[in-house]
Amino acid sequence: MDDRGGGTLVVASRPVLPSQRERVEPDEPMSEPVVLGPSFSRIRFVGFSVRDLARSAAWYRETLGCEVLRENWGSSAWQSSWDEVLLLHRASGVEIGLMHHPTNDGAAFSEFRTGLDHLEFEVSTLDELDAWRQRLDGLGIPHSGRWPHIVTFRDPDNIQLEFFYRTTGTASGGGDAASAVTSPAGG
């Protein structure tokens, strides 16, 4: 806790004196020291550029159970040069913004270009991971199956998404599962 009054900063339940704020020894070896600075508590919003806004909004609503918070088609709600649907996944609080820009060239997403590689949703149990796999099966959405801790799939624009269960010793990221699903779902 940083009281901004010259007090101590607590990281991982250890007090860090103001003179030590530049470096913190991590619990696991890392290649570079951790540098303390401003922090954030969670990711609240992710925005995706999509080729077909109505199709993508319907897919995220059906697949993830998102609800529509607001829509802007042809600047009907606010002035903008793009159309947008803002979705909410109520259980996690994550907002997913889907935008269609008039200059979108219509190419499918590829993690092999600069930018986003994939988005990962963490689940609490292996049973929950299995439930997501079964849901994807029920919707006819191709996926990687259940690797020990991950299910990889793609949205209609080929954006790679993953459900991930963190087990002891697993790191975030798809590894070999990431390449298991290469064609866009639903499109």
Image: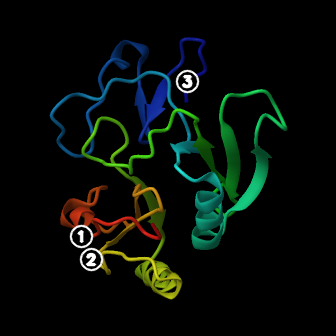
Callout 1: SS: loop
Q: Residue 116, how many percent across, how many down? A: 37, 42
CB atoms of marks 2 and 1 within 8 Å? yes
Residue at left 28%, top 65%? 182
Image quarter where the N terminus lies is top right
Q: Which three-letter amino acid code belongs to the residue tagged 2?
A: Trp
- Residue 113 appears left or right of 91: left
Mark 2, residue position: 147
Q: Quadrant of residue 162?
A: bottom left
User: Sequence-wise, which precedes: disc 2 or disc 3?
Assistant: 3
Q: How many angstroms separate mark 3 from mark 1 (CA)?
A: 44 Å
Q: Which three-letter amino acid code belongs to the residue tagged 1?
A: Ala
Mark 1, residue position: 180
Residue at left 29%, top 29%? 34
Vertical comparison of 25 with 135: above or below: above
Q: Quadrant of residue 60?
A: bottom right
Counting other residues with Cα less than 10 Å from the Cα at mark 3, is it few (<14), some (14-19), or many (20 or more)?
few
User: Sequence-wise, which precedes: disc 3 or disc 1?
Assistant: 3
Q: Residue 164, how many percent across, how many down? A: 39, 66
Q: Can residue 172 be seen here?
A: yes
Residue at left 77%, top 47%? 71
Q: Can residue 43 be seen here?
A: no
Judge by depth and name the residue closer to the eye, 74 or 175.
74
Vertical comparison of 106 with 160: above or below: above
Q: Nearer the viewer, mark 2 or mark 1?
A: 1
Judge by depth and name the residue closer to the eye, 20 or 153.
153
Q: Quadrant of residue 97?
A: top right
Mark 3, residue position: 2
User: Sequence-wise, which precedes: disc 2 or disc 1?
Assistant: 2
